[in-house]
Every structure is written in structure tokens, then in C-alpha cells.
Image: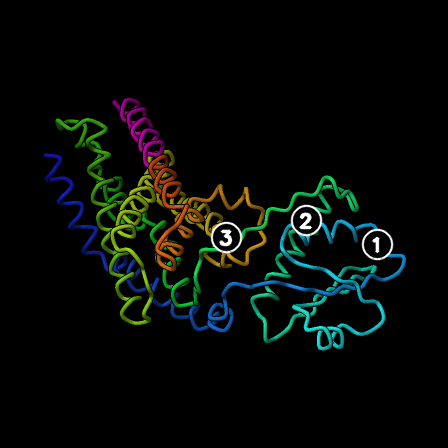
Amino acid sequence: MIRYLIKNNAKLMGRSWVNVLLFTICPVIVSAVLISAFSDLMENYKERGEMHCGYSIEAGSIWESAEEALKISGEQAEITFTRFDTEEPEEMISKNELSGFVKFESGGYKIYRVSEKPTQGAALEYFMSVFCDEMTYAGMGSVENIKLHIEHPSFLKAVDSTDYYGIVFVLYYAWCAIICASGILTSEKKYGIRRRYTVSALNDLQLYLGRFVPLAIVVFFGTAIAALLNSICFGANWGNLLYAGVLFLVMTAASSALGLMFQSITDNMIITVILTFSLVWIAGFFGGSFETYMFSSHPEYMKLLSPIYHCNRAMVEQAASGRTDYFPSAILYCAGIIVVCSLISVAADTIRRRGRA
């Protein structure tokens, strides 16, 4: 009977035009917009090389006490800082072929970027953001307490906006899997179908699998179609298809389990959608779905807490370079979500079922 339930639910989910629109068309549309909007930035992403930056400090400003910390931290990030106080930043950049210039003033700092070196300019902005965060945390001028966490993905080859946003937004939409099951779950509650299940031979785990398995299958194929459309329409590269397929399968199962957990706890589809979308948006914000993780200045621990970050890095890096250190963590993170969320869902359904008995 469980096979009939899985088959029937899969058919009902697959026939919904909302599912087709959300998981196959919407990722393609959003990817197209972002690929176009960020093409200038991403197509210039490459190894930044050696950086020599200039700086000036306004006399009497608080930055004077942080000068030594700036140079030491710059060495950690492979950036050489040289002080120039006599001429304007534009002149110093032109004369000394600098990668950028930072002008420290009493009210803050201003970065002068070189238009011919967009990657180095972005790297300088990222460094200064992290440096100021660490200085604020450690106390201005406390050099011994400063430990910058700056990433150097040396093996990552060029990644343009097509490959990046053509990948990450397909993954992002896959985490909204619960929408596929919204029609079935709403109908079960509205027409009292769940009460009929109580007299069947199916236990709570089998009833959960009757929703979880078809949901994961439908979302997997929906996102796979979106990935294929991005490849055909924009030329997005997915790298090793076996790696990509395994990650897609485990990730869509994790997103399905997450949404079903919220539904089992709340027993309300509207609240479930709100909770799921809020959590996915936050995870995507820190995970690189909106701002590329290469240029993001979010704290490292916040990134690592996001399952989307692990999935994005694993998929993008293996597509660009053929290898990644994040594939195991992405699989383990998603597998943990599947196990924990499934146990909570079954427990919540069991408690509710006994309460109605």
C-alpha cells in the first residue's frame, strides 16, 4: 500500500503547474537576470596576484594607532601596504602602479580602486571590511589580538556570472521544496484524509515516507530540468555530472525533510511556508546565493552554519576546477538534516495522531 501512496502522491505533485513554474521556470528567469546584472564583475574574477596598496592617515585620527596592525594584517592577506601622505591617491596609484589606495580620515576611510584591476579592488574592499570588523572586536590598535580569516581559494579557476548564478539559484529554489506538497497536505487536512489513514495498516513512518519520497523525487527532477535549461540557454557548466547528481539528490531530500518537519510541527501550511522561506532566505544570504561567497565579508562561522553555503561551494568549485573540499561537508550536512527532521516529523505526527485517537 505504501508504494501506491508514493506513486499517487508523486503523480498529484507532478501535475501541479505551480510546481513546474517554481522549480523549472523561475530559477531560469532569476538566473538570466543575475547573469546579466553581474556579468562585468564575475567575468573578471581570476587570481588577483601580488597586491601593492598605498594608504594615507589623517593626523590625529584613531587610525594612527592601527597602522602597525594594518601592515601586519596585510602581510597575512598577502597585501603590501605603503604609506604616502604627500600626494593625492589618484596620482600615487598612477605613479607607483598600485593595486588600490586607502585614505584613512577621522570619520572613516575611503578606498580608491583601479578600474583595470576589478578583482584586486574587490579583494581590497573585502580585506578592509574584515580588518575593521576584527579591529572593532579586538580593540583599536591591539595587534596581538587580531586574527584575520581570509580565504584564498588558490585552486579555483575563473568563475563567471553564467556559471555562478546559473548554479546557485537552481540550488536555492530547491530548498523551497515544501511548495510542491502544499496542495496535497492542504487537501489531506481539509477533507479529513488523515483520519482515514488511522484505520489503515500504515504506521506513522510509512505515512511520512508516503509524503517524503514523492516530494523529494518531484523536486529532484524539477531542479534537474532547471539545471538542464540553464545549460542549454546560457551555457552554465555543471562539471562532473555524477557529483552534481548525488549532491542534488541528497540536497533535495534534505529540503523536503525540512519543509515536512515544519508542517508536522505546525499543522498549518501558511506558517510552514513562512518558516521555510524565512530560514532559506537567511541561509541563502549567508551562503552566497545573493552575494558571491568569493567577495562576501560575512563572518566565516555564519557562512559555515548555512547548508546552502556548503552546497554552493561544493557545486561551484567542482564545476570550475573539478575538485572541492566542501563536497563531504555538504553531503554530511544534508544527511544530518534528513535524519533529524525526519525523526522530528514522525514524532510530531505520532503525538498528534494519539491525541486525536
- Counting residues from the start of the chain, the first of labels 3 and 1 encountered is 1
Instruction: Provide residue 347's location: percent of width, then percent of height.
Output: 32, 26
Residue topped by disc 3: 285
Q: In the rendered view, would you say 241 is above or below 110?
A: above
Residue toward you, 253 or 190? 253
120 or 334: nearer the eye? 120
Q: Residue placed at 17% from the left, 45% from the top?
A: 9
Q: Which range of residues does the magenta coloring cover?
A: 338-357
Disc 2 crowd rating (10 Å Cα; few below 14, some 14-19, many 20+) is some
Q: Count of labels shown?
A: 3
Q: What residue type is labelled 1?
A: Glu
Type of residue at label 2? Asp
Mark earlier in primary sequence (2, 1): 1
Which numbered disc covers residue 64? 1
Percent of width and height locating residue 26: 34, 63
Q: Is residue 70 left or right of residue 276?
A: right
Between residues 259 and 67, which one lies in front from this camera angle? 67
* Point 73% across, 46% down: residue: 136
Q: Residues within 10 Å of mark 3 (few under 14, many from 20)?
A: many
Q: In which quarter of the image is the C terminus?
A: top left
Q: Which residue is drawn at 75% across and 73% down?
A: 92
**Quadrant including the N terminus:** top left
Q: In the rendered image, which residue does mark 2 sit on? A: 133
Image depth: mark 2 or mark 1 in front: 1
